[in-house]
Image (cartoon, coloured by chain):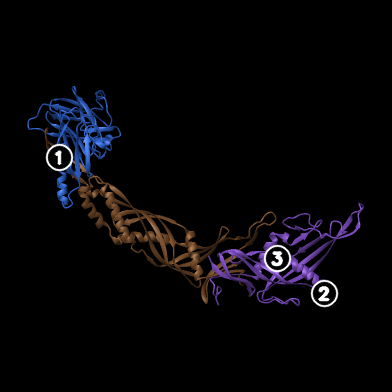
Chain colours: A brown, B blue, C purple
Amino acid sequence: MPSDLIAAIDQTAANTLLGAAESALGTLSKSGSGSLGPLGASWSASGSFTGGTVALSPPDTIAIDGLEIDYSLSLTLSIDLSFLDIHIQICIPTPFGDFCLPPINIDFPTISVTVPFSSSATLSADFGLDVHLTAGTWFVDAVIQSITQLDLGAAAVLLLTAIGAAISVALLAIPFIGLVLSLAVAFITAAFGLADVTGLLGPIVSAFVSGLTFNLYQQPQNFQVLPAAPPYNPAVMVTLAAVAAGVQASGKNELVLSVDI
Amino acid sequence: MTALDSRVISRINCFAHRFSAPGTFRYGLSLLPVPASHHDDETRVQTVIVGVQAVGGQRTHYVTVSSGADGLSASPARLEVSAGDIVAWSADKSVRFGFRVRGAMGDDVLDSAALRTESIFTHAFGLAGSYEWTDANGSGLSGRVSVMMPDASSTQDARLEQMHKGTLVHVTGSQAEPAHVEITVGQTVVWAVERAPGVTITDRSLLQ
Amino acid sequence: MSLTGTHHAFASIDERGVNRALQAFFGARPHYLHYGSAPFVTGNSITETQVSPIAFPGVAGGIAYAIDLTIPVVDLYPPDGTLPPPLVLGPDQLSLTTQVTITIGCMAGSDSDGKGRITPVKTTLDVVAIGHPVSVYFSPGVGFVRFAVDQVLVENVAPPSLQAVLDCLIKMILNAVLSSVELPFDIVDAGFFKLILEAGPTIADNQIEIWGDVS
């Protein structure tokens, strides 16, 4: 039996609604840990989504191509420099006789290097429609089902450069590091490369994509047709008894919402 | 920890003294000034017993200062040396904030925070820069240490070898010779002090 | 054939949906169906609307009256059944059936104080009307669909001149009542989008349809 209410949009309108859904999603925050070669790494990041082109595909698939994830990342690397520890032994003639100082042991610490970084990635994925009534509200969500493409762009190269610069600044602040700076740099340079950075960055970006959901429709089941207009006009309410959503192909691919009241 | 200040002996410093005459040096270890009379309590007092000059020449003895639940302690707490020997105090890893050696031998007071004679203070410089130093006790004694980064073209082995070379500054009274020295990062300056009115070697920026 | 056609958005409400919306509207605001002067209605409330009596020289206090309607039932084109002639339901039209009860406060005789006694006298008329939807659009997502009555037939009335009088009277009353009934675009598109109205409303296939774009 046909539904009481039918609302349909084509792909052009779907792109307009996608923009609104992206804005409504706002900025997401994620955190986690991993490794960069032999170095421990922890991170916190925030990300938001913009852009993308919608293609509707029956019976219930919304494909989004070129969805951009703009993210800001704070990466903290832990570097154990104890391998640089050095032992100083000095003997020097003085007016009081030859004097050999007690050995001086220079212990290099484990340093934490924080690397701020911002970039963007591009995503293409298929989303499925999820209609549900939760706590008295109808939701129609587009939920990510499969990623067809995730492009980090030049971010890995840029992050590698940023990490190098941050480590250099951190090292120079360590007393006595000048003696062994070349050793420190050589070790750190050999410890990880572009592949390791990509291996760290990929899961960070993926954390934002996993379970990505855009809300396309949200209305209370007890739906207000007209607001109250005191003193003699109470609000006019109807019940959205059932909601269904899908993609239909009849000349144009359209996202169709069907509601019984 | 890396500040240039002989008033606090840290892990990159050492304080040394040549005991030229026999006697018993009773001393305490502290961060703050402690009256000499405080050392009468033998359970808290470390000692250096100086005997007659030994045959065979001068020796250097090492005392390691540690920090524990009961405060600072010296190892060995009781040391027997010969006249003319040098005793050097230095800190181990447990000492976080440094220490001061202060005690008396007869009527003579020996204080690492007020260097008088036959005393040595050393400091290893870890960061490049220009260090203007002076006497915090106001004698007018002063000087400068210029610390340079190692030559970029030098090899790692050459740099490490340089670390084992010290630079001497001879302090007589209120004069330092040379007043200005130039070293590379990692090297140590040794101040040998004699006939001075109880001076410190203190970074001028700490006194502002 | 796509729903959106040459536009980007489409919304429709079917006959059952329209009737449920009307039930919700008049159920919440019954005063739009019940009108009367004193003594039938003593004041405005959610359930009834007070009107002035019909002034007439020599009738003390005027002629008291009341008008009561049942919730109109709408039939969207194409018609579900045959309409009483000469009414014909065409494309983009709706028919509307209701019962109108007219009550007169008939003043006869006098009571012990010498005042006129009012006795209610009423008749209930079966009314069928033909009308069409009208859209009012203000801005994206803001607007509504309203109904206008074009033709009314009060059944089983004689002579024809009386029927003509009642047809006109009921038509005016129905248009006045329906002028308060507004179906916001939100109920037509279930709040899915903010509609920029470009075409409609039209009536076909038992539903009211509108087209446009989204913002």
Residue under circle 3?
Answer: C178
Disc 1 crowd, CA 10 A, few/some/many (<14, 14-19, 20+): some
Is residue B186 or residue B46 the one in the foreground? B186
| Badge 3 amino acid | Leu
Q: Quadrant of residue C120?
A: bottom right
Residue under circle 1?
Answer: B167
| Badge 1 amino acid | Thr
Q: How far from the left and from the top, in percent, is residue B29?
A: 25, 30
Q: Does C125 sit left or right of B31 as displayed?
A: right
Write down the chain letter for disc 1: B
What distance separates the C-alpha of mark 3 from that of mark 1? Answer: 105 Å
Q: Does C111 sit left or right of A208 as displayed?
A: right
| Badge 2 amino acid | Pro
Helix or strand or loop: what does disc 1 sit on?
strand
Q: Does A211 sit left or right of C100 as displayed?
A: left
Q: Are marks 3 and 2 in contact (CB under 8 Å)?
A: no
Extreme-top residue of the structure: B107
Residue A88 shows up from this direction: no
Q: Quadrant of residue C74?
A: bottom right
* Labels 1, 2: front one: 2
What distance separates the C-alpha of mark 1 from that of mark 2? Answer: 130 Å
**A80 is higher (above) or lower (below) than B15:** below
Helix or strand or loop: what does disc 2 sit on?
helix
Q: How far from the left and from the top, in percent, is residue A256?
A: 54, 70
Number of numbered discs visible in the structure rendering: 3
Q: Does A56 sit left or right of C168 as displayed?
A: left
Label disc, if present, on residue C160 of the rendered structure: 2
